[in-house]
Image (cartoon, helix red, strand yellow):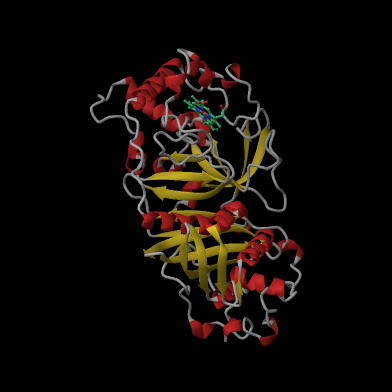
Amino acid sequence: MRLMNLGGRAALALAVLAGLSAPPAPAAEAQADPILLIRHDGGARTYSARELLARPDVEEIAIADVGAYPGQEMTFRAVTMARLLEGVPMPRDASVEFLARDGFATSLAPDILANTAPGGAIAYLAVEDPARKWPPLPRREVSPGPFYLVWIHPELSGIGREEWPFMIDRIEVKSSLETLYPAIVPAADVPDGDPIRAGFAAFAKNCLACHTMNGQGPGRVGPDLNVPMSPLDYFAEGVARQFIRDSQSVRANPNTPMGPFGTDILPDAALDGILAYMRHMAGRRAAPDPAPAPRDEIAALVTASLESWETRDRDQFRATAHEDLVFAFPGRRTDLAGALAVFDKWSAEYEDTKVYIRRILVEGDAFAAEYQFATTRKDTGRRSVAGTVALGRVADGKIVLIKEYLDGRVSRGQEAGLMPLDEGAEPFPWPPIDLTEVDFSKVFAPASVAAPKPGP
Ligand code: HEC
């Protein structure tokens, strides 16, 4: 029975070792089908680009001068955000974060997104057809796909330039900015009408998508604007203002993603407010985090290792692993070099991976991580989402043992279209299905299981 437990990356590793190749993919499925994840309290839903494009409520919309293609008119196939968020539970103080692949993250209020009335802006999620990609972004090799938040009549609701996130791959419903990121909030005793308050709002709208403040905020494109020092501490008087208006007039950096903020986007009063807010925050520098307990360090190490599968960051995977690593999973036991070979092969053949970590328990130098591993095979476009557990041990600050238990019947059943994906949902390992209705003989046909070669 051991060989039956193949799946996800374990199955891949075995297939590689045994010289197997996957059956040729039908041409229509040859391109990957990117996944949009909408995560909310208590669950998540996913849509593939093709699935969205096939919906009856897809519209064709033309927009002149979108941020990604200045001065051009573009046509997009898009679904209203109102329809996409239908039925997604929204707590009363919710904010909706759009997280992009490049670290950009926009936070928006649910009521603005839900509007479909002609008196206000209407939000659409534009979907890139995997077979006909959008043109690349200026000065970058990638397109703004797979998903792009665009607006009809943005002026009616005062939608700002940084509120058009592209390269989106997930949308998360969270609580208010103030609750999520308390260290970005001005002091409670700043009165309501104070420019600092308006400045905070303008900062959240225009800057927070890229910059953190006191280490907090969803965006990861630019530097933090308060720790360890505020730019107002080291920019000469007036230079910070000039930098924000047009950073290229202070220092040349043609590839900077920070566009100039002219008075059309940031009127003088709004920029004054932002500077007042930044000055105020310079006096509210976040205390450095207390030294983490070993337990937290182990949990962080395990998280970094698991997340490297999501980012396909080989160096990160390598950095978390001990020289004497033993890496074992159903079907194989190998060492560090073998683990890196599995990682490389897997990175080349899979994409759109998400690792949903549910919990990491630490006891002494041992850990147990429970997570869901979701990934898409590039050749077939098939997704699998397998719940699993890794047990292991840490030595010298590195992971020296990983024993992973992935039930390959789930991933193979999903790849064969026999089981739902149930991505992001608990409890795993198995999705809720009626076993009497599933014909597993196909998944477990003896011909589909090959004996592995012995490890190195
Ligand atoms: C699209 C992303 C993006 C947005 C939006 C953005 N920035 Fe930036 N910003 C950057 C990046 C990246 C850098 C660092 C590279 C550079 O200087 O261009 C930067 C640099 C800066 C610096 C200089 C920091 C230093 O010490 O060198 C300041 C000050 C700054 N930004 C303020 C702001 C303010 C205020 C806003 C909002 C009005 C804003 N930025 C909006 C990406 C962004």
Q: Residue at x 57, y 26 (%)?
A: 259
| Residue under the image location 60 percent in, 32 percent down | 67
Residue 192 image-quadrant placement: top left
- Lateral position of residue 313 relative to residue 31, left or right: left
Q: Give percent across and percent down for residue 342.
A: 65, 65
Q: Is residue 267 above or below residue 423?
A: above
The x and y percentages for residue 260 are 56, 23
Q: Specify whether residue 157 is in view.
A: no
In this view, 54 is above or below 333: above
Image position of 198 (left or right of 252): left
Residue 68 location, quadrant: top right
Residue at 64% across, 48% down: 128
Q: Is residue 417 left or right of residue 359?
A: right
Q: Nearer the viewer, residue 388 or 180?
A: 388
**Picture coordinates of residue 314, whole percent (x, y):** 62, 54
Q: Nearer the viewer, residue 38 or 386?
A: 386
Q: Residue at x 44, y 31 (%)?
A: 205
Front residue of this view, candidates 414 and 329 = 329
In the image as oriented, which residue stretches furthest toward the top?
Answer: 237
Q: Between residues 323 and 258, which one lies in front from this camera angle?
A: 323
Residue 286 seen from this side: yes
Q: Position of residue 364 (x, y in %)?
A: 37, 65
